[in-house]
Each structure stands twice: as structure tokens, then as C-alpha cells.
Amino acid sequence: MNKFLKALNVLKPDKPLEWRTFLLISLTIWIASILGTTDEEIRNQLAVLSWLALTIAIGFRTSQPPFIIGGIPLSPWVMALSLCLMIYQKTEATRPYFALKLWPLIAACLVFILEFIRDNFKIQSPPPLVRFGFIIIFLIHINIYCWIEFSIRFQDWLENVPEIIPRQEIFKPDSAKINQEFRSSSFRRIDQG
């Protein structure tokens, strides 16, 4: 019993808006989804709410040390990963790569939202360096999205057109045969002579 109480003290939040608060909310909703109802649709909706509260808890926790690398918190990327896992669970049958492609775009949007929250919701023109930094981050995420899209399309292309992959016999020295139509006139004279 003592160990159980110690574990509960670890989860006790120090402030109202803290990662432990959202973790407790997530656990409460999850337990309610399991024990509360037999209706499958309500269970699924409660499980989604529980996952969203867990995502917020993860976001709060990863915005604090030791999850800050070089002054940049990892929370936008970890939260985007958590949201994409939920999206993947919903779309894996119809669009299996949709969540993977959304990850960098959601992360870029979360970077913007978290900077907006950090500025206390003030809509003002940021200094040029901050604006430039956000544009760079956004363009890097767009670039990551494009590379993911390209690799998925290239993989599909290789599956649909298997002849594009080089075969071993192509690399043999005597495998190069020149088609008669495309031979130059000097080759034709040598053959005729």
C-alpha cells in the first residue's frame, strides 16, 4: 500500500496547468472509456479524448529540460508524432501513408502555435530574425514533407514498374547489343565489307 501511495505522489501535480494534470485527466478518461459504457462509439470518442489529453501532457513535459536541445524544445515534434499515431490508427486501412506525410506539417503548425502561446497571445510584428527563423523552420518541414512524399511515390513506382531496376545481365560486358536501326553507317559498312 505504501508503494502505491508513493506512486500516486509522483503523479500529484504541483501547479494546476502542468503535465501531470493532463496525464491524470488522460488516465481518468481512459478508465472511464473502459469501465463506463458498453457503447462502442462512445468508448472510441472517450479514447480519442484521452489520447489528446495525453498528447498535451507529453507536450508540456517535453517543453522542459532535459528535452530542450540547444534552446529548442522537442515538444512540437513529439506532440506531432503522438497526433500522427492517432491519425494513423484512424486512416491506416484507407490511406496508410497519410499520417507519415502529415507529421512535418503538424510539427510546423505546432511550432507556430507554441511560439504564439509563449508570446502571451500577442499579435504583433515579430523582429526580423524571429520571423526569418520561423520561415526557415517552416521551409525545412515542407522539404521533409516533400522528401517523404517523393520516397512513397518512388516506392510505388518501383513496385508498378519492376523493369526499371537493373538486372545482373545488363552489367556483363558482352550483353550490349546494338539494334540494327540505330547503327551508324560506319558499322554497316564494316558488316557489309
Image: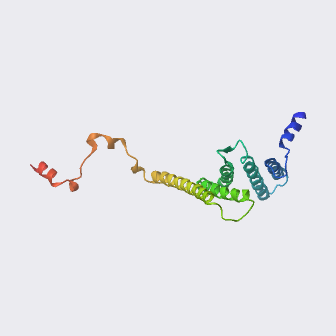
Residue farthest to the right, as pictured: 1
Q: Residue 45 sits in which quadrant?
A: bottom right
- Could you tell whether 61 is left or right of 133 in the image? right
Q: Position of residue 93 (x, y in %)?
A: 62, 55
Viewer-closest of 139 and 119: 119
Residue 100 seen anywhere in this rendered image of the structure: yes
Give me the residue at 46% from left, 54% from top.
157
Viewer-closest of 151 and 155: 151
- Could you tell whether 103 is left or right of 52 in the image? left
Q: Is residue 110 above or below residue 12?
A: below
Residue farthest to the left, as pictured: 193
By what rule are the colours in the image chosen?
Answer: rainbow
Quadrant of image for the N terminus: top right
Q: Position of residue 47 (x, y in %)?
A: 77, 53
Residue farthest to the top, as pictured: 2
For the image, the number of numbered tags is 0
Viewer-closest of 26 and 60: 60
Give me the residue at 12% from left, 48% from top.
190
Q: Position of residue 168 (x, y in %)?
A: 36, 41
Q: Residue 176 sits in which quadrant?
A: top left
Q: Position of residue 75 (x, y in %)?
A: 69, 49
Residue 94 seen anywhere in this rendered image of the structure: no
